Image (tube, rainbow, N blue to C red):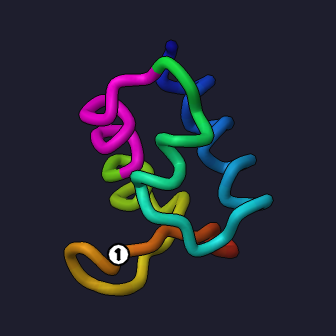
Amino acid sequence: MEEPHLRALIKEDLKLHPRSKISEIHKRVDDLDIKYLQKVVYKMYHDGEIGREGIKKTMVYLLVNKK
């Protein structure tokens, strides 16, 4: 799956299921390597597209309002 398409899917998933763990997103997005998903989620966080709360195993991701 191309990265721009995956980014759009992640955003849509977080709209429907805010405060989700990567493992929860992975269960809802079929046929995708977990490492690739993690890489894209981390990029989105560092680009300011999504936010996160918690630490390590309690980390959840959510959409943020960009100004």
Above-or-below relation of 54 to 36 = below
Residue at numbered disc 1: 59
Horizontal arrangement in the rendering, residue 39 relative to residue 63 (left or right): left
Magenta region, residue range: 32-41
Instruction: Estimate the x, y position of residue 64 in percent, counting from the top left.
Output: 62, 73
Above-or-below relation of 2 to 21 = above
| Residue 58 placement: quadrant | bottom left
In the foreground, 37 or 51 = 37
Q: What's the residue at 41%, 54% (across, down)?
A: 22
> What is the magenta segment's predominant secondary structure?
helix
Q: What's the residue at 51%, 13% (across, down)?
A: 1
> Is disc 1 surrounded by few (<14), some (14 to 19) or many (20+) residues within 10 Å?
few
Q: What's the residue at 31%, 44% (across, down)?
A: 38
Q: What's the residue at 32%, 52% (across, down)?
A: 42
Q: State the residue lying farthest toward the front.
A: 27
Q: State the residue lying farthest toward the left.
A: 56
Horizontal arrangement in the rendering, residue 54 relative to residue 60 (left or right): left
Above-or-below relation of 32 to 35 = above
Quarter of the image containing the C terminus?
bottom right
Above-or-below relation of 29 to 55 = above
Instruction: Estimate the x, y position of residue 18 in percent, counting from the top left.
Output: 67, 70
Give amino acid for label 1: Met
Q: State the residue lying farthest toward the bottom.
A: 54
Residue 22 shown in magenta:
no
Residue 15 seen in render: yes
| Residue 39 placement: quadrant | top left
Horizontal arrangement in the rendering, residue 32 relative to residue 66 (left or right): left
Q: Label 1: state its secondary structure.
A: loop
Instruction: Estimate the x, y position of residue 51 in percent, counting from the top left.
Output: 48, 72
Residue 67 seen in render: no
